[in-house]
Image (spheres, rainbow, N blue to C red):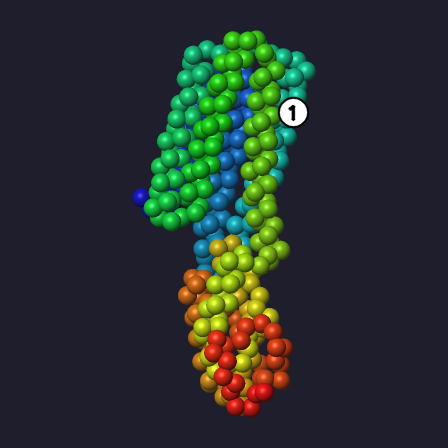
Amino acid sequence: MSASRLARWTLLVGVLSLCFKLWAYWITGSVAVYSDALESLVNLAAALGMAVAVGYAARPPDERHPFGHTKAEYLSAVAEGVLVVLAAGAILRSAFSRFAEPVSLSLSPVGMLALAVAGAVNGLWGLLLYHRGRKLASAALEADGLHLLADTATTLGLMLGLLLASQTGWLWLDPLLALFVAAHVLWLGFGIVRRSVGGLLDEALEPGVRSKIEAAVQGAMAGALEVHDLRTRRAGTRAFVELHLVVPASMTVEEAHAIATRIEEAVQGVLPGAWVTVHVEPEGELLHRGIRPARDHPPKGSR
Ligand code: ZN
Ligand code: ZN
């Protein structure tokens, strides 16, 4: 199954489990089940927003957006952040009013069965996504699968808690479980917002990726004197790399351009799809820092 078909099925599974959770809430009247249903709703909206954003982000650059549209993903992340806060607020409100005024739960077998079906649907699909993700080496699919598995665990925990509440008559257990779900929702939102803010503020690529880039540049810069002011950033799925390339002042433009092209290709070798920009400078611009050629035989004129 292709990634886009998997994404469509994930939406369908989300709708299905949301329906079962709403049904279970209608039967049981449990605020914990209500919060679990709200979490499913947020997940669903997030998946929908992501699908739209990824489609838009994949458009090639045009005259008005010469750097491409990859930052569109952050727009959907902002919307998700707002949704998460709203959902957590709604959960907290109903949980606290339940603490103040406990309501007895009606734990009919039908309500528990509806919850169990919602959990099973999520769990099975999560397992499948996780395994496909491992096979296709897709971190996004793997993360989606793990998230669904975590939701399944939440639903299982809710069922156990509700059973315990009905056996012991501890009605406060229901809003307490809802608070745990609210914490889970907020934690999720924090992760999304954290990643997007990093991208919007042009955070540098991870240190591990940077050292790979440096090694690639060093391997491709023979004939040049120094590379400095190497800067990296990311916009959605696309990485950007900029650097200054210092060459002997007497080198022809043609030679310098050949080195710059070799460096661009080497960086794209370790960072597929990256946009690399090289600024060429004569040896008067040497800063004596940054990256030097691997084998340091000084070209004519320098030292
Ligand atoms: Zn410079
Ligand atoms: Zn060129």
Please indicate whether residue 48 sits to the left or right of residue 187 in the image.
left
Please indicate whether residue 86 sits to the left or right of residue 219 in the image.
right
Q: Is any atom of residue 111 visible in this view?
A: yes
Q: Which residue is depicted at the point 66% across and 21% down?
A: 96
Placement of the C terminus among the 4 image quadrants: bottom right
Q: Is any atom of residue 65 visible in this view?
A: no
Placement of the N terminus among the 4 image quadrants: top left
Q: How many marks?
A: 1
Please state the horizontal and vertical placement of residue 11, each as a whole percent of the image. 42, 37
Q: Which residue is depicted at the point 48% across and 72% down?
A: 218
Q: Under tag 1, what secondary structure? A: helix
Above or below for 191 versus 64: above
Q: Which residue is depicted at the point 57% across and 68% down?
A: 230
| Viewer-nearest residue: 185 or 284 | 284
Above or below for 228 versus 145: below
Above or below for 15 versus 49: above
Please state the horizontal and vertical placement of residue 130, each as a whole percent of the image. 39, 40
Please state the horizontal and vertical placement of residue 265, each as a whole percent of the image. 43, 70
Going by the numbered disc 1, the residue's amino acid type is Arg
| Viewer-nearest residue: 257 or 208 | 208
Find disc 1 in the rendering and name its residue. Answer: 93
Above or below for 56 versus 182: below
